[in-house]
Image (tube, helix red, strand yellow):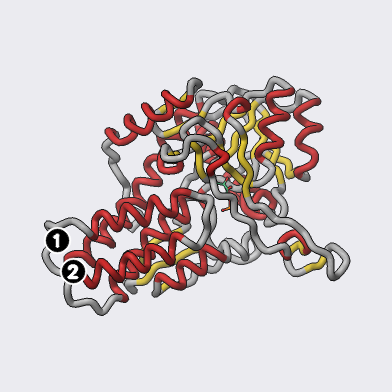
Amino acid sequence: MRTVYWDYDRDVMKMIDQRLLPFEVRVPDYATYQEVAQAIRDMVVRGAPAIGAAAAFGMALAARQSRATDRLTLLRDLEEAARHLEAARPTAVNLAWGVRRLLRVAADEELESVDDVRDALLVEAQRLADEDVALNRRMAYHGAELVSEGDTILHHCNTGALATVDWGTALGVIFAAHEQGKRIHVLVDETRPRLQGARLTAWELQQKGIPFDLIADNAAGHFLRAGAVNLVLVGSDRTAANGDVANKIGTYMLGVLAKENGVPFYPVVPTSTIDLNLATGDLIPIEERDMDEVLRVGDQPIAPAGITARNPAFDVTPHRYVTGIVTEAGIVYPPFEKNLRAAVERAKQIQWSVDSGQ
Ligand code: MRU
């Protein structure tokens, strides 16, 4: 099942509520772009490519909600929806990328009527979602070349089917290596404060029958120093032009410790997550979320009442700690400045043969 999809029988958008996993699988309807923006903020849907696809379907909903009878008014309504959706979460560039891609279609002069625009936006959102699945598969098989028989792979956060439309990025590489028959073991960081590793990655690995152990985040250094890890694979929410990688909080520590212990560290990054407009990771906006996420585990308080906490949701790993970056256009090595730009250009030339999830 896809994480984010359009239900063509009932003409509504659907998303798995990831806050409830692994204990309950609920897939509510979304009928307005405002509800979609709220779901992104609340992390019903999360993971950079998944929120990009959610925002694209959100734009298709916005076109249907608009009462405009002329194209100019419809475009104005869509611009308003775009601003609203883009403000939902600041770090993952896929959100703005998805919204902008839909706005470009809406501005196409060839579309004659407002209904033509409405139809074209749903077609484009569906195409974006289908391409996400196809490119994840391709990226995974590039990445699987890095995995050897018997490897133990350290993984952070959730980068699987749930973080994308389907299949996944870093976890997708692990799925591909397993599919190729390689015997692997995964160390899964629990990923405080929202526990995407414990709740979501563990759930996905268990379903695929891939051997793994869940570890507390602060155990990762111990396993790296002990020589128990062959490869670190992570995702990214935004990668700057110089190869600096923003990803789930805690990734930077892994990058530094991997280098210190001579373990290769590879972010797995679709080119939609590469932001060539930002020269370095210092320019990437880092979301700071509600301190309650740190002060509680689920609904359970874990600290004295009345104290404060800090909750940055992402950090930046400078490119000097990055061995290489896996993309759908191949694995990119330093100098990242030049080679990432070339990978983005190569990716534009790829013709996706997409298997629609409709
Ligand atoms: O806060 P989240 O759960 O949306 O953060 C997700 C991550 O940091 C992932 O590693 C990232 O989106 C890339 S994987 C598809």
Q: Position of residue 234 (x, y in %)?
A: 59, 38
The crowd level at tag 1 (other Cα within 10 Å; few <14, some 14-19, many 20+) is: some
Q: Residues within 10 Å of mark 2 (few under 14, many from 20)?
A: some
User: Which one is nearer the viewer's eye here, 132 or 319?
Assistant: 319
Quadrant for residue 75, please give it.
bottom left
In percent of the image, x 73 and y 44: which residue is there? 214
Q: Determine whether, in the image, residue 267 is placed left or right of residue 199.
A: left
Indicate whether 29 appears above or below 22: below
Rendered-image quadrant of the C terminus: bottom left
Q: Residue at x 22, y 60 (%)?
A: 120
Label 2 or label 1, whichever comes before in sequence order: 2
Q: Is residue 298 left or right of residue 324?
A: right
Q: Residue at x 53, y 31 (%)?
A: 177
Q: Is residue 65 above or below residue 288?
A: below
Task: Report whether residue 331 is seen.
Answer: no
Question: 239 or 228, which is in the foreground?
Answer: 239
Q: Secondary structure at mark 1?
A: loop
User: In this view of the protein, can residue 161 be seen by the observer?
Assistant: yes
> Which residue is identified by label 1?
111
Q: Is residue 305 above or below residue 167?
A: below
Amino acid type, residue under disc 1 in the picture? Leu
Amino acid on which the number 2 mark rests in the picture: Arg
Q: Where in the figure is residue 301, as x and y percent of width and height? A: 81, 67
Where is residue 11, by image quadrant? bottom left
Closest to the camera, between mark 2 and mark 1, is: 2
Residue sitting at 50 percent across and 24 percent down?
145
| x then y, percent, for residue 161 | 51, 49
Q: CA distance from mark 2 to mark 1?
A: 9 Å
Residue position marked by numbered label 2 in the rendering: 71
Image check: 348 left or right of 206?
left
Q: Are marks 2 and 1 in contact (CB under 8 Å)?
A: yes
